């Protein structure tokens, strides 16, 4: 199973771990490709449900080919990482939804910070570095001083993390810098100390 | 002239990444055209990046935070400024020693491998007038990190001689203006030396002394030199370049001489 599939299935509640945390259980499915005509394409684009389209389907249409490739293994560590990313996504969504209630904003934002620490602990390589970038970025931001544009940027950053993982660390940094969130701490007086070096 | 075009000098690049006023600087630059140079990148690498690499090796050798801080404290006896700088970096990265060792190490790895340069290049374009070879040197990782920034006169890694010849008149102006100020005695001696033989501009000993002058000359027409270093005032004065000091940012004052 691939990462993006796990994330999608998790969101659809079609995937879970077995009780001994040894296997990922998911609903297997077949990807079937049918040739479509302009009428069906138009129906899809205009939002007609799949069932609705099936009713109209020309019986002479037959599958062109069938794909069933759900074999890429995800390790338990991968699953845990992905679960934390989904939690982070949910928590930042909670911050956004409850932005006007300072108590909820504090509770969810604090949980978000804690969850980042969890992500740092279990991840490796670029994912670990990205988790740390995010942690450094927000550890000194108090919930009461949090701005809505910053919440939007954090949401976007988590989406990137979900899509491409640690490979997205540079993109995430830019997203954060654009709204004045810094992933590098301030070091007062450093530039002055370098003045004689030039 | 408006303040829409700025040439970022090395101290402002460091201030933009680590400084107390970084929010202000980033906001100020957000609607400006920001330019810097490969020579500035070289200065950034030989100071900021090199310090981070040294700190990483101290941490790896000592294997815990307190030990490293103690070691750096002792280092102040031998190499005060370097020790102070590296201690400051460690202190802030470890959030005054509240973060765990592994976390500080990971953060340093990220800074050394990519984050410092990502910040350096954030919304900044680069020019390359001197073709400085050291600016292109990359960090290598084995047990720890290494960055070869050795520069010897005999090994040609740049086009500084051509740069000096192209800007000979400006260097003369610089010499006329600066030789009245004791603070620039070393710089003036190097300029005199390179007038006799422009090959002497090569190599770290002379080239790095000319750094402020080189950077000022690199700044294209229409760009203000944005810096925290007050020495640039006199240099820009002699070269008829505009300067914006960070200290004056609040009023976006232009010192036009």
Image: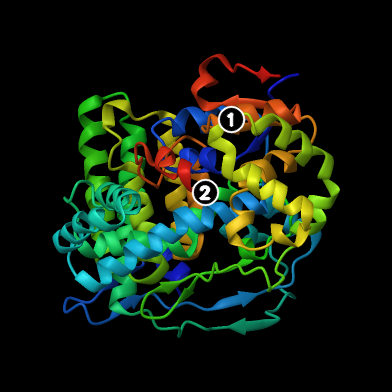
Residue A78: x and y, percent? Answer: 34, 73
Q: How crowded is mark 1: few (under 14 residues within 10 Å), some or many (20 or more)?
A: few
Taking the spot 32% from the left edge, 71% from the top edge, the residue there is A79
Residue B181 numbered tag: 1
Which of B2 and B62 lies nearest the eye of the viewer? B62
- Count residues near mark 2 (Cα–Cα under 10 Å), then give few for <14, some for 14-19, many for 20+: many
Mark 1 and mark 2 on one chain: yes
Kindly identify the residue that appears in the image at 47 percent across and 54 percent down. Answer: B47
Tell me the residue that label 2 is attached to: B119
**Place of residue A28 in the rendered image (x, y in percent of width and height, measured from the top left):** 43, 78
* Helix, strand or loop status at disc 2: helix
- Marks 1 and 2: CB-CB under 8 Å? no
- Tell me the chain of label 2: B
Mark 1–mark 2 Cα distance, whole angstroms, equals 35 Å
**Residue B223 horizontal side relative to residue B203, left or right:** right
Q: Quadrant of residue A40?
A: bottom right
Mark 1 or mark 2: which comes first in sequence?
A: 2
Camera-side mark, 1 or 2: 1
Q: If the image is split into quadrants, where does the N terminus of chain B sit? A: top right
Q: In which quarter of the image is the C terminus of chain B?
A: top right
To which chain does the residue with label 1 belong? B
Going by the image, does B51 lie left or right of B5?
Answer: left
Hey, which quadrant is residue B142 in on the image? bottom left
């Amino acid at each position: 199973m691939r990462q993006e599939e796990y994330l999608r299935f998790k969101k659809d509640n079609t995937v879970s771990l077995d009780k001994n945390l040894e296997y990922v259980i998911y609903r297997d499915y077949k990807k079937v490709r049918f040739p479509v005509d302009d009428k069906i394409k138009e129906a899809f684009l205009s939002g007609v449900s799949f069932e609705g389209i099936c009713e109209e389907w020309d019986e002479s249409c037959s599958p062109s080919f069938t794909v069933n490739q759900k074999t890429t293994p995800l390790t338990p560590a991968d699953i845990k990482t992905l679960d934390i990313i989904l939690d982070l996504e949910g928590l930042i969504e909670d911050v956004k939804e409850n932005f006007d209630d300072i108590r909820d904003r504090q509770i969810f934002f604090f949980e978000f910070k804690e969850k980042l620490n969890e992500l740092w602990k279990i991840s490796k390589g670029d994912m670990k570095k990205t988790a740390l970038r995010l942690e450094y970025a927000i550890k000194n931001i108090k919930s009461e001083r949090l701005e809505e544009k910053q919440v939007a940027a954090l949401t976007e950053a988590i989406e990137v993390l979900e899509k491409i993982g640690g490979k997205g660390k540079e993109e995430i940094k830019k997203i954060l810098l654009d709204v004045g969130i810094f992933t590098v701490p301030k070091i007062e007086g450093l530039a002055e100390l370098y003045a004689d070096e030039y | 002239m408006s303040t829409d075009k700025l040439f970022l000098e090395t101290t402002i690049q460091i201030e933009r990444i680590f400084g107390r006023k970084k929010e202000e600087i980033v906001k100020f630059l957000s609607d400006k055209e920001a330019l810097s140079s490969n020579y500035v990148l070289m200065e950034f690498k030989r100071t900021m990046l090199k310090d981070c690499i040294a700190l990483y090796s101290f941490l790896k050798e000592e294997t815990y935070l307190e030990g490293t801080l103690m070691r750096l404290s002792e280092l102040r006896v031998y190499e005060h400024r370097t020790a102070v700088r590296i201690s400051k970096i460690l202190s802030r990265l470890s959030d005054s020693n509240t973060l765990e060792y592994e976390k500080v190490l990971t953060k340093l790895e990220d800074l050394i491998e990519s984050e410092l340069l990502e910040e350096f290049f954030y919304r900044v374009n680069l020019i390359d007038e001197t073709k400085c070879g050291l600016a292109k040197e990359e960090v290598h990782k084995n047990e720890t990190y290494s960055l070869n920034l050795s520069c010897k006169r005999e090994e040609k890694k740049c086009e500084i001689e051509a740069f000096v010849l192209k800007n000979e008149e400006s260097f003369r102006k610089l010499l006329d203006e600066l030789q009245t100020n004791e603070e620039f005695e070393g710089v003036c001696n190097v300029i005199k030396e390179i007038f006799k033989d422009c090959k002497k501009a090569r190599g770290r000993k002379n080239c790095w002394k000319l750094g402020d002058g080189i950077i000022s000359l690199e700044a294209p027409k229409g760009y203000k030199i944005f810096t925290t270093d007050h020495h640039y005032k006199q240099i820009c004065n002699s070269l008829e370049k505009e300067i914006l000091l960070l200290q004056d940012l609040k009023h976006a004052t232009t010192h036009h001489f």
